[in-house]
């Protein structure tokens, strides 16, 4: 890269980045090309939920609303290694129904399984059908790839997506750009549309299969992370987002103890390479599951609803190569639909009670945020009756 290329990027009138709908998170991290993000969490912590809501649906919704005013164009390759497309679509529909209409619904209710929350009314079914156009357009930009494969399979799919499929030996058609070979040792990728930002989500990396010569968990994760860092981020200028499990030993470390709850690099499962290669590392934790009474100033017991649902999660920015790290954000987590909502600081949570969520004032105004964050299941709207 020449210095003049850097200066052209600096002087560009419209930087290529996407704003996050979570104000605190958006203040500290920037979603732009060539940024590798690692999410870690215990099972059930909500790591998939925050990736889906904050880094897929909310970003797509922002772009839909602003696409006539901005140049940036987001696209996604979404590797869903745990659940098939039908269940992913249903989860995203439940998220949209709550986001747009405050309708609390979950996947069992959408499919009317025996553990459903309620019967579907004709009015609600008609509303769900009205999202046909929205999801048709969403999946023009989200390439959802279900099922597990090995790291090389993941990389080859990315290569074909970016460079096009091979139509004859050495010739590719389609794709998002072309490869320029500057000399025998150096090549670079040039986008057909430089305003595109392409995300690659892998949920989750612990589900990847082994391949020839790479059978152990560490070898598989190291191979995957190398592809994400060297190819997806550094060569194709994509935004890889890896979802990872935390080691179960974190439960033994903190359960019932008075030690301050924290997430460390060693808590990421299987290999240190994804952590070392990532530009941004985020950890999600469920203090209630660990028997912790307070976390970052929040009273965890007050997030447990009358029916025993725990609606708090803690997010920690562990590593941030281009900004501030080592800080925590409290989140209201609605497990039924995957909604993650930022909370004020713990010392500003409970000030004055209001009767309903509709009375919620701007952030940091007097309001009983504990009441706002809990017993959501008692507020089923008229659409659900």
Image: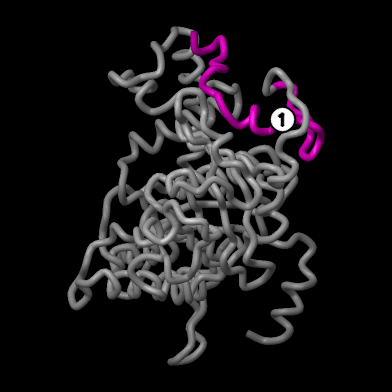
**Image location of residue 308, percent across then percent down:** 45, 28
379 above or below 44?
A: above
- Would residue 89 appear left or right of 317 to someone viewing this image? left
Q: Would you say residue 149 sits in the magenta stretch?
A: no
- Would residue 248 appear left or right of 316 to someone viewing this image? left
Residue occupying the point 40% across, 60% down: 250
**Image location of residue 203, percent across then percent down:** 38, 53
**Image location of residue 113, percent across then percent down:** 29, 21
Residue occupying the point 35% across, 62% down: 249
**Image location of residue 201, percent across then percent down:** 44, 55
Pointer 1 local density, CA inside 10 Å: few below 14, some 14–19, many at least 20: some
- Where residue 32 sits, quadrant-wise, is bottom right
Residue occupying the point 45% across, 58% down: 40
Q: Which residue is mark 1?
A: 368
Say how the picture is coloured: one colour
Depth order, front residue of 277/151: 277
Whether residue 239 is visible here, answered yes or no, is no
SS at circle 1: loop
- Where residue 11 sits, quadrant-wise, is bottom right
Residue occupying the point 39% across, 66% down: 159
Q: Residue furthest bottom?
A: 184
- Would residue 109 appear left or right of 342 to someone viewing this image? left
Whether residue 366 is visible here, answered yes or no, is yes
Q: Which residues are magenta?
A: 358-385
325 above or below 24?
A: below
Depth order, front residue of 383/153: 383
């Amino acid at each position: 890269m020449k210095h003049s290329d850097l200066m052209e990027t600096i002087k560009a009138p419209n930087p290529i980045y996407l704003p996050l709908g979570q104000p605190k998170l958006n203040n500290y991290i920037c979603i732009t090309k060539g940024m590798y993000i690692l999410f870690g969490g215990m099972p059930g912590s909500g790591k998939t939920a925050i990736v889906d809501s904050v880094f897929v649906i909310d970003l797509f919704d922002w772009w839909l609303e602003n696409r006539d005013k901005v140049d940036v164009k987001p696209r996604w390759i979404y590797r869903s290694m745990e659940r098939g497309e039908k269940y992913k679509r249903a989860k995203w529909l439940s998220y949209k129904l709550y986001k747009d209409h405050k309708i609390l619904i979950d996947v069992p209710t959408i499919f009317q399984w025996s553990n459903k929350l309620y019967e579907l009314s004709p009015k609600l079914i008609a509303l769900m059908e009205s999202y046909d156009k929205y999801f048709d357009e969403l999946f023009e930009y989200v390439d959802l790839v279900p099922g597990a494969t090995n790291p090389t399979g993941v990389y080859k799919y990315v290569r074909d997506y970016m460079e096009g499929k091979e139509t004859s030996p050495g010739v590719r058609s389609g794709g998002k750009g072309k490869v320029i070979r500057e000399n025998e040792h150096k090549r670079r990728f040039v986008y057909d549309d430089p305003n595109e930002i392409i995300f690659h989500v892998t949920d989750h990396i612990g589900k990847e299969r082994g391949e020839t010569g790479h059978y152990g968990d560490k070898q598989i994760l190291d191979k995957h992370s190398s592809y994400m860092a060297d190819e997806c981020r550094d060569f194709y200028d994509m935004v890889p987002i890896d979802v990872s499990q935390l080691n179960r030993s974190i439960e033994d470390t903190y359960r019932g103890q008075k030690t301050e709850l924290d997430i460390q690099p060693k808590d990421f499962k299987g290999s240190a390479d994804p952590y070392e290669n990532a530009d941004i590392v985020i950890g999600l934790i469920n203090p209630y599951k660990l028997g912790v009474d307070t976390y970052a100033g929040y009273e965890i017991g007050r997030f447990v609803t009358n029916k025993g649902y725990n609606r708090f999660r803690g997010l920690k920015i562990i590593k941030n190569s281009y900004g501030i790290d080592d800080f925590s954000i409290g989140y209201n987590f609605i497990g039924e639909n995957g909604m993650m909502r930022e909370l004020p600081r713990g010392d500003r949570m409970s000030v004055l009670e209001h009767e309903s969520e509709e009375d919620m004032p701007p952030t940091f105004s007097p309001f009983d945020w504990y009441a706002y964050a809990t017993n959501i299941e008692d507020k089923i709207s008229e659409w659900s009756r």
